[in-house]
Image (cartoon, coloured by chain):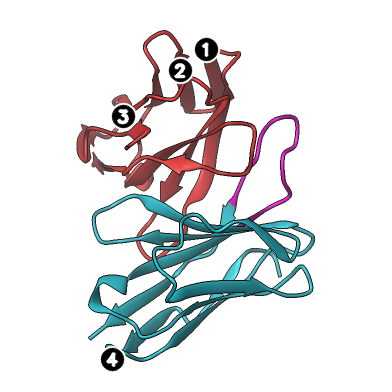
Amino acid sequence: GAGVSQSPSNKVTEKGKDVELRCDPISGHTALYWYRQRLGQGLEFLIYFQGNSAPDKSGLPSDRFSAERTGESVSTLTIQRTQQEDSAVYLCASSAGLIRGKNIQYFGAGTRLSVL
Amino acid sequence: DQQVKQNSPSLSVQEGRISILNCDYTNSMFDYFLWYKKYPAEGPTFLISISSIKDKNEDGRFTVFLNKSAKHLSLHIVPSQPGDSAVYFCAAHTGTYKYIFGTGTRLKVLA
């Protein structure tokens, strides 16, 4: 597609349930990123993929969070046993990597997760 | 440790006037700075960037200034238009993949 696509756009779940968020990056982009934005706060880095491997998972807040990427394309972010503090907008971005020292990331519209 | 700070959560400007959005950083290893604009219910979109070897970059109504000695950058929008009303994030990276974002400034341009 033309841009980064995320689904679902909104997700309401009950505390304790697992959720899976999906990201389709721009075709050909080797790098993929997940961020979280809590209400009134900035973008918090979660994880970075280069191809199908994740060299940096340092932003994942707990072992309830995991992500994978297959076929150098689609990525899924899974949150197990959701808690109310997981409520946020989860943003995915992709990029073609460093070009002349610059790395421009292109973002999807995000998934708004509400944990009741 | 907030390496990139936007100390003004909001800013209101009259249409046609200049909007100045500010960003401070602490890490002298940052070598690229970017500004993103975000409308409600949309993802951030890239606006303009500047390399650490420059002090100014201009693109139409948007100019970014970098003061390395002060570890400060600013985004100037001239003239401001109502469609510029959005949240603006500054971001920095160090020649790798990882952005550090500021917390954003909500700009409101009044008609």
As drawn, the label of residue A14 is 4
Tag 1, which secondary structure?
loop
Identify the residue at horizontal 66%, vertical 34% (top origin). Answer: A102
Q: Do tag 2 and tag 3 residues touch (Cβ < 8 Å)?
A: no
| Disc 1 crowd, CA 10 A, few/some/many (<14, 14-19, 20+) | few
Q: Magenta span covers which residues?
A: A94-105
Residue kind at label 2, given as amino acid type: Phe
The circle drawn on residue B16 is 3
Q: Residue lying at the far front in this picture: please name it.
A: A63
N-term mark: 3 or 1: 3
Mark 4, mark 2: which one is toward the viewer? 4
**Total number of numbered discs in the rendering:** 4
Label 4 to label 1, Cα distance in Å? 50 Å
Disc 1 marks a residue whose amino acid type is Asp
Q: Which residue is mark 2?
A: B65
Checking the image for residue A102, the label placed there is none
> Depth-wise, is mark 2 or mark 3 nearer the camera?
2
Q: Nearer the viewer, mark 4 or mark 1?
A: 4
- Vertical order, A115 against B100 (above or below): below
Residue B59 shown in magenta: no
Disc 4 on helix, strand or loop?
loop
Whether label 4 touches label 2, CB < 8 Å: no
Q: Which residue is mark 1?
A: B55
Q: Main secondary structure of the magenta part?
A: loop
Label 1 marks which chain's residue? B
* Chain assignment, label 2: B
Labelled pair 1, 2 in contact (Cβ < 8 Å) = yes
